[in-house]
Amino acid sequence: MAEKTTAEKLATIQQGYTLEGPTIELGVALIDGELHKDAPVRLPLSMMNRHGLVAGATGTGKTVTLHMMAEQLSTAGVPVFLADIKGDLSGLATAATGSEKLKARTDSLGQDWSGKTFPVEFLALGGDGNGIPVRATITSFGPILLSRVMELNATQESSLQLIFHFADQKNLELIDLKDLRAVIQYLTSDEGKDELAQLGGLSKATAGVILRELVNLEAQGMGPFFGEPEFDTAELLRTAPDGRGVVTCLELPTLQTKPMLFSTFLMWLLADLFEDLPEAGDLDKPKLVFFLDEAHLLFNGASKAFLDAITTTVRLIRSKGVGIFFVTQTPKDVPSEVLGQLANRIQHALRAFTPEDAKALKATVSTFPVSDYDLEEVLTSAGIGEAVITVMNEKGAPTPVALTRLCAPESVMGPSTDELVKSTVAGSSLLSKYGTAVDNVSAFEKLAGQAAAPTGDAAPPLPAPPLPSPSLPSEPRQQRNDGGGAVGEVVGALGGALGGGLKSMVRSFGTQLGRELLRGVFGTSSRRRR
């Protein structure tokens, strides 16, 4: 077959990216080394809940790409969540200043550029940073996610689930780390040894291992993240008074010391959103778009239950109107089950310095549709701010592969000043809700005899929960406080390690906490009253 002419390649891209509805303007196509302003490369706003991948070697412009996309989503009225790994996404709150170099680039793209600020909310895990403190209760986080943070093996994870089950039976609320520590210490004490024996499948030695890992979490300074007031994930869905979507920027100044907490927290956010949001079907634009930077942290060393839950969440949260973009170095960082659900692909340059790099390059090329480009050559020669793109068009088909020079952000590509960040936080409506930690009566106080409330059984003793394989639900959950009907079905499908016997347990639990403990994709629950 004769090679296509430049004009034919241009026509293919122009036709493939001619879209009717609102779009994110990604850039313009590069064909045979020449930039074509008349071949814009776009991503339909209505397809952003089909999820995506932004990949590329370090220093190729991935962060600038998600920065630019976040700006346009906000302008379109779509809330955005960003994890600020490197500390430079706070620049969204500061208008960029033009320069001759920038003007030359934007003119070459036909981009109508002007410096702008965007509505930004700053968060910080447990107050580790300048942002609004974000906390979650131990009960809400759940045993599967907590096992991930503590790096427990499968047996220890199952044992932790039994500990949560015991705490729920006994009305021992697990709010912070000292609550869970108190319950484990009770079970391993002489006073609690009969209770430990009744649980079945939980040895004193394994309970001791979990207790030691819990102490390690406290020693690593993770205690402030677990507690109340718990962050309401509905805060991520807000728009500014002018109709633009609020960009929620999570500060991560100590990510290198707490990578597991960071990645697991992101899945807690998604799991909580999944439980709260109603089915939405196809929308003109998503309700929220997540950008999960350093995505490999989610998957490294993850248990099968955790991976199954991630896969199921990614598959099903699309119907709730939420889009997820994984940001990482190569597609091989993402399991194939998840990668297969990422319809929108923005691939920056890769390096091929080692045999391992060469394998990663070939694997990346194999994930793209057949194109008019020599992708191995293009992906090793693309410049900073350039990427190979294919997305899903409005009919649900992949667009032609296009080497693209990307649009420039209109806010600062770097950090805002500390003074601006602090003043933004001080003026936030969230500060009064989440700024001050509270310590309500819970398991620690009850076991210490400091509360008048009795610690009796919440329900008759029940058998230890089985650990079935996940399956897909036949119908979505219709309401949050339904006492276990449709909710039980969702849990049976999505729990990964919580299902079967636990669904029947829902019907016999007499407390709201008992019912809600079983709802989450990861065994998470919410004690909030909305």
Image: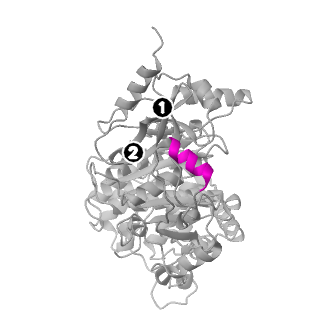
Give the residue at x 41% y 48%: 24
Measured as percent of width and height from the top left, residue 377 is found at 62, 24
As helix, strand or loop, the secondary structure at mark 2 comes to helix
Measured as percent of width and height from the top left, residue 112 is found at 45, 51
- Nearer-the-camera pick, 114 or 137: 114
Query: Based on the displayed image, in which of its 4 quarters is residue 276 positioned?
Result: bottom left
Residue 295 visible in image: no
- Magenta-drawn segment: 99-108
State left or right for residue 192 relative to residue 392.
Answer: right
Residue type at the position of mark 1: Ala
Q: Is residue 100 magenta?
A: yes
Above or below, comparing residue 399 to residue 464 in the picture = above
Residue type at the position of mark 2: Arg
Q: Give how far apart the Cα atoms at labels 1 and 2 are.
A: 26 Å
Badge 1 crowding class, 10 Å Cα cut-off, few under 14, some 14 to 19, many 20 or more, is: many
Q: Which residue in the structure is indicated by mark 1?
A: 402
Q: Earlier in the sequence, mark 1 or mark 2?
A: 2
Q: Which residue in the structure is indicated by mark 2?
A: 315
Q: Is residue 289 magenta?
A: no
As helix, strand or loop, the secondary structure at mark 1 comes to strand
